[in-house]
Image (spheres, rainbow, N blue to C red):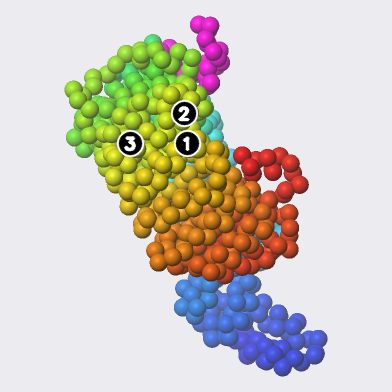
């Protein structure tokens, strides 16, 4: 019985405190701690009676199962395990650049997520792995699986030992909320055990969100989405009685005749993807992005027929046939509430569009692409969304689309689904962007009020009309979050007009982000917005060249500070990439006077701040202390030009702020150039 080691630990500690010079003392202490760590399953309650300093040392020798089990009791003694989880994460991922602010639970969840992904795909754990010792593999997987809410599935086969433990998959079914598919390959190339996991999580578990990193094979997409509308049928699920190897019906074309026939039929119906033309053959300027078109696909797929009629896949629950017998378990098709495709291509629309009108449980849809959507394709999407919106029980509230060719398409999509609460789009105009859309869909007789609460519009530095954006802002009185990026004032549009519209029409705005917009001529509009507006909680003016045309830069920053102090609700301020340089010291006046700012987070990254200015800022903050500890981000500033002064400045600030820094190298001339941009 290892209990006597607890008393030996105490004695070793006493000997050390008494400065006993015997060389055996530290060795004995370590032996005792390691022995106790190997028997924490029976000694954890007694071990927690040790002095706090010994408990902290003991924690570093525990495996993750014991550490996770005793963490609540350790917390009750006022001890945080953050340093242990951070150490585990460093051993897994290597040292991190700069500092990271995470809570104790976030450190634990991040470590568990990293470890599980390694174990899931059978990677070997290198280096010091004492946090995995003295515990069996299944126990490790079980404790790690509890913290997995986002699971990445790849075509590479998961560790075989994982699937020998049904209890682990049961834990995942309860906890995983989001599934991410890592590769875009043919349906038949996905291993059956990976598809089995996908089925269990979607149809028997709590997973409701699906993310596809690359443009999915249309057959794979149809296989996942088919039957998830209101008319989905109930199928007999044979999976629970699986005893032997699962038959890979989706992999072997010569398996069962019906399986091979269905797969071949699906392949014959789905058009192959074609490489896009990167040039405008009408003699115009080459397209910023290649364009998509489903015109050719429409000839082979009738979008007006029943959803996916031409490539109905076998139900998920029938893809796995046990070697002996069938289960009588009833298998309902699980709902998918969120779908995100990060590399959207032409073959997806013929599968997706027919499903949308009846997909009542869909809450969020995101279609991102490195290509530019044709106007006709965007309007086809609008038509499907309009049918969905008109159906009682529609749940869609979030839509993200990119990249569109014309700003007016934003209004087409919003008019098609006016109940959207969140909308995000990216505009990449082509040479003929000024042409009217190829066709139109029925529009409301008048510009009805929109339900938008969040709006994000990104525009490249090209000649782009923003009249549609202004119209949408005027129709969105409930807007609480606005993110606009890249508007070019050279088109005759002044960003001051945007700021004035926001001040007049969006009175409930709490989060305003303006990025890569030249606001050097808009100081009065900024001050007026802040002086007359009292609901902003977060303001980000990133890369807005605030001081580009100022003769007295300190005076402008001081006026900005005075206006910011008039917003009592403001919690977060981001002024990154504005070339503040020496004027950063004026920000120390944010907390000066009888009405100090309520800002809790301040980001002044990439402003060419040097150690002397940082030290002066620290001294000002010491004189005018923030009401509560400030989260201060200082990344990408040349603080290494005077290391001694930098350390002094950071030491001064560390008493007042939680600092987020990095290891910026000023000797890199390109780094210096970027920091001043």
Q: Is residue 302 above or below residue 66?
A: above
The Cα atoms of the two marked residues, 3 and 2, are separated by 16 Å
SS at badge 1 = loop
Mark 1 vs mark 2, foreground winner is 1
Residue at figure coordinates x 28%, y 39% from the top left: 505
Residue wearing tag 1: 521
Whether tag 3 and tag 2 are in contact, CB under 8 A, the answer is no
Asked if the magenta segment contains residue 128, the reply would be no
Q: Which mark is residue 501?
A: 3
Residue wearing tag 2: 489
In percent of width and height, residue 580 lies at: 58, 48
Q: Is residue 9 visible?
A: yes
Q: Is residue 60 above or below residue 363?
A: below
Give the residues in magenta.
274-298
Residue at figure coordinates x 36%, y 13% from the top left: 436
Q: Main secondary structure of the magenta part?
A: loop
Say which of 103 and 665 sits in front.
665
């Amino acid at each position: 019985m290892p209990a006597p080691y607890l008393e030996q630990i105490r004695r070793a500690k006493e000997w050390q405190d008494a400065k006993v010079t015997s060389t055996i003392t530290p060795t004995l202490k370590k032996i005792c701690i390691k022995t106790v760590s190997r028997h924490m399953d029976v000694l954890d309650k007694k071990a927690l009676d040790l002095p706090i300093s010994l408990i902290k040392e003991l924690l570093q020798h525990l495996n993750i199962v014991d550490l996770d089990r005793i963490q609540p009791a350790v917390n009750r003694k006022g001890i945080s395990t953050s340093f242990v989880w951070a150490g585990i994460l460093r051993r897994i991922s290597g040292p991190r650049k700069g500092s990271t602010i995470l809570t104790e639970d976030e450190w634990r969840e991040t470590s568990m997520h990293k470890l599980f992904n390694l174990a899931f795909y059978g990677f070997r754990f290198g280096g010091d792995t004492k946090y995995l010792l003295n515990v069996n593999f299944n126990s490790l997987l079980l404790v790690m699986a509890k913290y997995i809410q986002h699971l990445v599935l790849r075509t590479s086969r998961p560790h075989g030992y994982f699937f020998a433990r049904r209890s682990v998959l049961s834990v995942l079914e309860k906890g995983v909320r989001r599934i991410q598919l890592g590769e875009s390959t043919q349906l038949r190339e996905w291993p059956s055990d990976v598809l089995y996991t996908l089925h269990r999580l979607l149809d028997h578990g709590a997973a409701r969100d699906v993310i596809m990193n690359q443009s999915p094979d249309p057959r794979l997409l149809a296989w996942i989405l088919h039957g998830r509308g209101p008319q989905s049928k109930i199928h007999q699920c044979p999976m629970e009685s699986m005893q032997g190897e699962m038959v890979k019906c989706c992999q072997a074309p010569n398996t069962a005749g019906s399986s091979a026939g269905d797969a071949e039929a699906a392949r014959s119906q789905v058009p192959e993807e074609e490489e896009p033309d990167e040039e405008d053959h009408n003699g115009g300027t080459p397209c910023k992005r290649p364009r998509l078109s489903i015109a050719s696909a429409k000839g082979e797929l009738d979008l007006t027929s029943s959803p996916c009629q031409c490539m109905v896949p076998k139900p998920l629950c029938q893809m796995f046939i046990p070697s002996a017998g069938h289960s009588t378990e009833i298998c309902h098709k699980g709902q998918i509430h969120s779908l995100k495709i990060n590399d959207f291509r032409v073959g997806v629309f013929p599968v997706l569009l027919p499903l949308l009108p009846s997909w009542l449980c869909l809450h969020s849809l995101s279609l991102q692409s490195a290509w530019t959507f044709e106007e006709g394709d965007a309007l086809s999407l609008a038509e499907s969304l309009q049918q969905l919106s008109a159906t009682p029980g529609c749940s869609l509230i979030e839509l993200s689309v990119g990249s569109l060719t014309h700003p007016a398409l934003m209004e087409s999509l919003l008019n098609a689904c006016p109940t959207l609460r969140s909308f995000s789009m990216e505009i990449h105009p082509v040479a003929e962007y000024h042409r009217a859309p190829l066709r139109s869909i029925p529009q409301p007789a008048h510009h009805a009020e929109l339900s938008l609460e969040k709006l994000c519009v990104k525009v490249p530095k090209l000649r782009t009309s923003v009249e549609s954006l202004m119209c949408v802002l005027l129709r969105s009185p409930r807007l609480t979050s606005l993110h606009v990026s890249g508007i070019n004032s050279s088109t005759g549009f002044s960003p001051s007009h945007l700021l004035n519209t926001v001040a007049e029409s969006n009175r409930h705005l709490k989060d305003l982000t303006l990025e890569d917009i030249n606001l050097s001529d808009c100081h009065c509009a900024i001050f007026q917005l802040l002086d007359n507006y009292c609901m902003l909680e977060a303001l980000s003016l990133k890369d807005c060249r605030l001081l580009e045309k100022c003769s007295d830069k300190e005076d402008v920053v001081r006026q900005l500070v005075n206006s910011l102090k008039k917003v009592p609700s403001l919690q977060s301020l981001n002024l990154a990439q504005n070339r503040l340089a020496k004027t950063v010291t004026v920000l120390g006046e944010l907390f000066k006077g009888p009405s100090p700012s309520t800002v809790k987070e301040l980001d002044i990254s990439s402003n060419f701040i040097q150690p002397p200015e940082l030290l002066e800022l620290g001294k000002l903050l010491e004189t005018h202390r923030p009401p509560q500890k400030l989260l201060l981000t200082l990344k990408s500033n040349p603080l290494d030009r005077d290391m001694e002064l930098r350390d002094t400045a950071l030491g001064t600030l560390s008493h007042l702020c939680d600092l987020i820094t990095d290891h910026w190298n000023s000797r890199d001339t390109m780094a210096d150039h970027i920091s001043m941009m």
